[in-house]
Image (cartoon, helix red, strand yellow):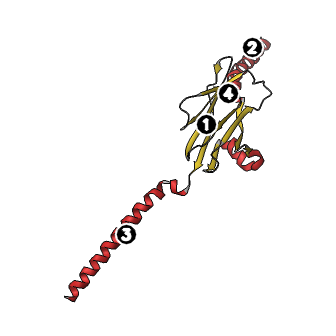
Amino acid sequence: MRKSILSLVVFILIASITFASSDTLIDSRIEINDVLIFNKSIIEESDSRHNEIIKNKNLIITYKEKEITIHWGTTDTVDISNYTFAYTLEGFDKRWCYTDEHTATYTNLDPGQYRFRLKWAKDEIWTNTPVYLDIRIIPLFWQTWWSRILPLFIIFGLFIIIIIIRLKKKRKKMIEN
């Protein structure tokens, strides 16, 4: 009796692990593993920058680095040649792009915040949790909000200075009279 209960518990554990892992393995196989800026790998450029992308899913680039290519792949030994991929760059793409390739390239991105999302399907079953990468392109200083407001403050300040100077001249004339 004890052996059969133990066998049943082991069977239930193995079955639940198999059932639970079949869904999570589909979701955990694909990762963004490299980003190229003007066809130069970030891995070659800096390990810390690459780690920032892989661990924190965050990429910060300057306005000069507007051409990026995102590579994805698997960390397992699973063959993903029969997978279908769909990706979108929120803030740029209007819809999902479907491909069998493992890369996406974007050129002439305007400064701002973007989110790259990647999902995939095997045997037409799509993953529930897409992989993402937040991308921030830092603008030139004259493209920032504060540089657009600064001239207004300067004009307002000059206007105030002109009013103060005129008031002082009027006071001086009144005192002299």
**Separation of residues labelled 4 and 3 (CA atoms):** 60 Å
Q: Disc 1 or disc 2, which is closer to the eye?
A: 1
Amino acid type shown at disc 2: Leu
For residue 131, side relative to residue 9 (left or right): left
For residue 102, side relative to residue 176 (left or right): right
Q: Disc 1 or disc 4, which is closer to the eye?
A: 1
Q: Position of residue 149 (x, y in %)?
A: 43, 58
Q: Nearer the viewer, residue 160 or 59?
A: 160
Q: Disc 4 or disc 3, which is closer to the eye?
A: 3
Q: Disc 3 or disc 1, which is closer to the eye?
A: 3
Looking at marks 3 and 1 on the same chain, the residue that comes earlier in the sequence is marked by 1
Q: How many C-alpha atoms fall within 10 Å of the one at disc 4: few (<14), some, or many (≥20)?
A: some
Amino acid type shown at disc 4: Asp
**Separation of residues labelled 1 and 2 (CA atoms):** 45 Å
The kind of secondary structure element at disc 2 is helix
Looking at marks 4 and 3 on the same chain, the residue that comes earlier in the sequence is marked by 4
Q: Residue at x 22, y 89 (%)?
A: 176
For label 1, the residue is 116
Q: Disc 3 or disc 2, which is closer to the eye?
A: 3
For label 2, the residue is 8
For label 3, the residue is 158
Looking at marks 1 and 4 on the same chain, the residue that comes earlier in the sequence is marked by 4
- Say above or below: 169 vs 91: below
Q: Nearer the viewer, residue 168 or 7?
A: 168
**Separation of residues labelled 3 and 1 (CA atoms):** 45 Å
The kind of secondary structure element at disc 3 is helix
Q: Position of residue 66 (x, y in %)?
A: 62, 46
Q: How many C-alpha atoms fall within 10 Å of the one at disc 2: few (<14), some, or many (≥20)?
A: few
Looking at marks 4 and 2 on the same chain, the residue that comes earlier in the sequence is marked by 2
Amino acid type shown at disc 3: Leu
For label 4, the residue is 27
